[in-house]
Image (cartoon, helix red, strand yellow):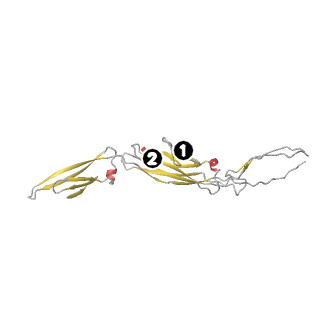
Amino acid sequence: GTTITGLYGTLTIGADGSYSYALNNADADTQALDAGETGQDVFTYTISDGEGGTDSATLTISVTGTNDAPTLTGTTTGLVTEAAGGNDDAVGTAGEPTATGTLVTDDVDGSDTTGTDNFSVVSANGEPISGDETTVIGAYGTFAVTEDGVWTYTLDQDKADALADEAMPTESFTVRVSDGQGGFADQVVNVTVNGANDAPRAEAATGAANEDGPAILIEASVVDPEGQALTYEIDTAGTVG
């Protein structure tokens, strides 16, 4: 048979006049058809009787488009660092509390533009999130995505205090872009949280004792954010008497 390539697919005509049409779904013109939009592949063919007689005819194939899901690419990783707290320069250091990136969407359907795409966060650390949430709270910070696909992770220093030095847990958030026609694409964003050492915290304690009286017990509140074992030293500076 004879094979002819059209706008959306390929037509094969047999010697007996029969034909078959194969749609090319990978073709850019086919993918660009909107949901419900009709495109036409038009073929003109000629038949001959072998004696010089010919006739031409037109065959029209109608192709109806369906919705194609958008795609989502871009920055999918980030790193934040806890600010180390302490009473000396060796321990107290500034951190990097925010990470940001941009997710880029594309849609092959002609009428589905980036202006009609909607971003949302559908899961945090594997836990599903219902609704069209754009801001969610994770284990150590807050993740947000804008209508333009710009995401930001902001570390909560209080939650990160429990992280030991060099601990590096990862928070994972799934961002979804929807085209409003039932099509969507998901992309996972992973943010690594770099822990830092925090100095222990002690609260002042007071007590009163009488000369030649019994010993007294003074309970001081001392907490280490990472739960590390502590050593103690008593400062005896001062005046007694």
Q: How many marks?
A: 2
| Image-based side of 4 in relation to 238, left or right | left
* Residue farthest front in this picture: 214
Residue displayed at 51% across by 52% down: 189
Q: Which mark is residue 30?
A: none
Say if 180 sits above or below 12 in the image.
above
Residue type at mark 1: give it: Val
Circle 2 crowding by C-alpha within 10 Å: few under 14, some 14–19, many from 20: many
Reading the image, the residue beneath label 1 is: 136
* Residue farthest left in this picture: 51
Q: Secondary structure at mark 1?
A: strand
**Where is residue 232 drawn, in percent x and y?**
77, 54
Reading the image, the residue beneath label 2 is: 177
**Where is residue 223 drawn, in percent x and y?**
71, 49
**Where is residue 47 drawn, in percent x and y?**
14, 55
**Where is residue 181 drawn, in percent x and y?**
39, 43
| Image-based side of 20 in relation to 93, left or right | left
Q: Secondary structure at mark 2?
A: strand
Q: Is residue 124 visible?
A: yes
Q: Is residue 149 visible?
A: no
Say if 219 sits above or below 229 in the image.
above
> Which badge, 2 or 1, is on the more N-terminal residue?
1
Q: Quadrant of the N terminus?
A: bottom left
Residue displayed at 32% across by 51% down: 30
In front of the other: 216 or 172: 216
In front of the other: 74 or 158: 158
Residue type at mark 2: give it: Val
Q: Between marks 2 and 1, how big is the CA–CA gap? A: 16 Å
Residue displayed at 64% across by 47% down: 158
